Amino acid sequence: DVKVTQSSRYLVKRTGEKVFLECVQDMDHENMFWYRQDPGLGLRLIYFSYDVKMKEKGDIPEGYSVSREKKERFSLILESASTNQTSMYLCASSFAGLYDGYTFGSGTRLTVV
Amino acid sequence: AQKVTQAQTEISVVEKEDVTLDCVYETRDTTYYLFWYKQPPSGELVFLIRRNSFDEQNEISGRYSWNFQKSTSSFNFTITASQVVDSAVYFCALSEELGQGNLIFGKGTKLSVKP
């Protein structure tokens, strides 16, 4: 069964901490994505990557960075966590070209206190 | 600019009722792709369907059916004889590049099916 695995389901961090959210896929997908989901706002794209060591800003990249050192792993980094980054974070992956949509992970619910 | 509008924020129905979830999109491209995803309470988004802009055939999969109309820029989703297990948030999404571009999501419609 193909999977996108996010390392933590729930996470509580303090304001100002550096936070790492990890995402691993086992489908040899080229593309990987980080979204955040907030009530009333839907899903918004933070960053995405088409290949190892490549990254592109999405719609709301401020306060975030990413790392993709290996094809299967895409990390989201909150450089200095703030309370307005409390959210559900969803990782997704897909093949380049023909595919049947994105495959999503189960999400990480991050609370910054 | 791309945009997806799901005007219905929440819908509540009784089991066995039919329900239609609306999706209206905006894009300047002539080639684009439309999707529906289901997000059950567990949180993981589940892919339901992809439709290409050049294929306006409606599709039926069991109790699910999709009505794609380019003339009205709509891609509506109907569940026939709804069941409690259909309770979830449903997202419509648009992409202008298959597998390359990112998905633009609507804000979702929360469907509650009561027994």
Image: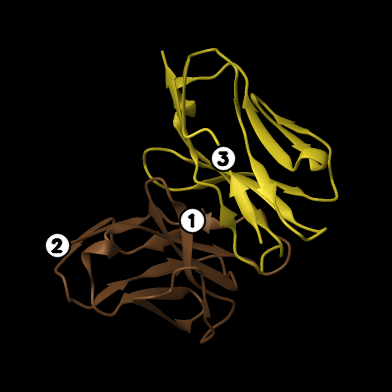
Chain colours: A brown, B yellow
Task: From the image, tell me which residue sits under label 2.
Answer: A113
A43 vs B76: above or below: below
Disc 3: which chain?
A: B
Task: From the image, tell me which residue sits under label 3.
Answer: B6
Front residue of this view, candidates B27 and B67: B27
Left or right: residue B115 versus residue B65 is left
Image coords of residue B23 (percent x, y) = 63, 39
**Residue at mark 1 to residue at mark 3: CA–CA distance:** 21 Å
Discs 3, 2 touching: Cβ within 8 Å: no
Disc 2: which chain?
A: A
The image quadrant of residue B48 is: top right
Image coords of residue A71 (percent x, y) = 52, 78
What's the mark number on residue A4? none
- Amino acid type shown at disc 3: Gln
Q: For the image shown, how many numbered marks are present on the structure?
A: 3
B40 vs A9: above or below: above
**Dot in front, 3 or 2:** 3
Task: From the image, tell me which residue sits under label 1.
Answer: A104
A35 vs B8: above or below: below
Q: Mark 2 or mark 1: name the one nearer the start of the chain.
A: 1
Secondary element type, mark 1: strand
